[in-house]
Amino acid sequence: MIETYPTLGLYINGEFIGANCRTTQDVINPATEEVLGQLPYATKEDLDYALASAAEAFKSWKYSSPMERSAVLRKAAQLTRDRAHEIGRNLTLDQGKPLAQAIGEVLGCADHCDWHAEECRRIYGRVIPSRRPMTRQYVIREAIGVCAAFTPWNFPFNQAIRKISAAIGAGCTIILKGPEDSPSAVMAIAQIFEDAGLPKGVLNIVWGDPPFISDYLIRSPIVRKISFTGSVPVGKQLAALAGAEMKPVTMELGGHSPVIVLDDVDIAKVAKSLARSKIRNAGQTCVSPTRFYVHEKAYDQFLSEFVSLLSTVKIGNGLDETVDMGPLAHQRRLQTISDFVEDARAHGANIE
């Protein structure tokens, strides 16, 4: 195992819980295929514990002042900046992206905490003019309750802290199921908020079988709100589950980012921008260009510029500072890309 890689576990009611007799999953370094650690899967009892902890913590957290919540988020933002290099290194180990991108992801997320720290102080209500005399109508915004959140593996720190800081700032408690392939970033977030003074039970983190956990949490009467970032097919399944319970959902589902290149642009500049976007995180982003519609007058020059730029990309271990693009995150992505290549060849593409 990598000596500096963190010990992995569940985080429930302010307690880090190890594997003990639980089912575990190997966490793999995609660059070396080395086993980094074992990640414990939550049992039904663990989920019940997380639900009970979040429900109990909500009883007091919903009455916390905006200033108190803001202070926790401000402290979390500072700790995120202080620990960005260590967190980024572990993120590169289990997710694969180049170190500079990993550190940049973490540093950018400190701004999310700061933003929610300010927004939570501005959760204003409204006074509405009434059509009835001697009647006052007003709106008061209140925390909805326990939230269940599900985050992806491509930006594990970014996606998790955005949901967590928003829930905390609103006065909600949250149970987050993070990505089993790249868990170190979410473990770091748990430690950050604990060190920032977040009360026990406000944040809970679980791992495990996605269908089992999502079904169990969404059906629980304790959970009042669902947030999901991931693929369209899974989003449809979770939306159906939530709809059956009449629970509100917020979803950010997978994108395909087609690009239109017209003939009146600076082609060299556009090609450089798109090449940079294409290799970011090995193309594993929702804004990675997947289809190009190029004006016939611009086609030859754009193709030449774009291919030339991609031919200089250095691929390798993300810890190497000279590397431009790291490995794909896991075997599932490798199989998907292999299928894309075979499909392209079958349709007459020239692949160099």
Image: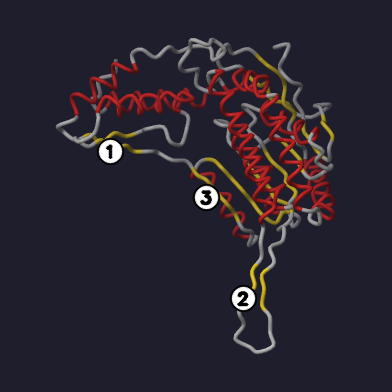
Residue at the disc numbered 1: 260
Name the quadrant of the C terminus.
top left
Residue visible at 74% across and 56% down in the picture: 145
| Residue 41 in which image quadrant | top right
Give whichever of discs 2 and 3 has the lower sequence position.
2
Q: Point out residue 342 in the picture as x, y percentages from the top left corner.
A: 34, 24
Residue at the disc numbered 3: 236
Name the quadrant of the N terminus.
top right
Q: Point out residue 234 in the picture as x, y percentages from the top left corner.
A: 54, 44
- Going by the numbered disc 1, the residue's amino acid type is Ile
Q: Residues within 10 Å of mark 1 (few under 14, many from 20)?
A: few
Residue visible at 49% across and 25% down in the picture: 281
Residue visible at 39% across and 27% down in the picture: 278
Which numbered mark, 3 or 1, is in the foreground of this view?
1
Which numbered mark, 2 or 1, is in the foreground of this view?
2
Q: Residues within 10 Å of mark 3 (few under 14, many from 20)?
A: few
Q: Is residue 158 above or below residue 5?
A: below
Residue at the disc numbered 2: 128
| Real-space Cα separation, disc 2 to disc 1, in angstroms | 46 Å
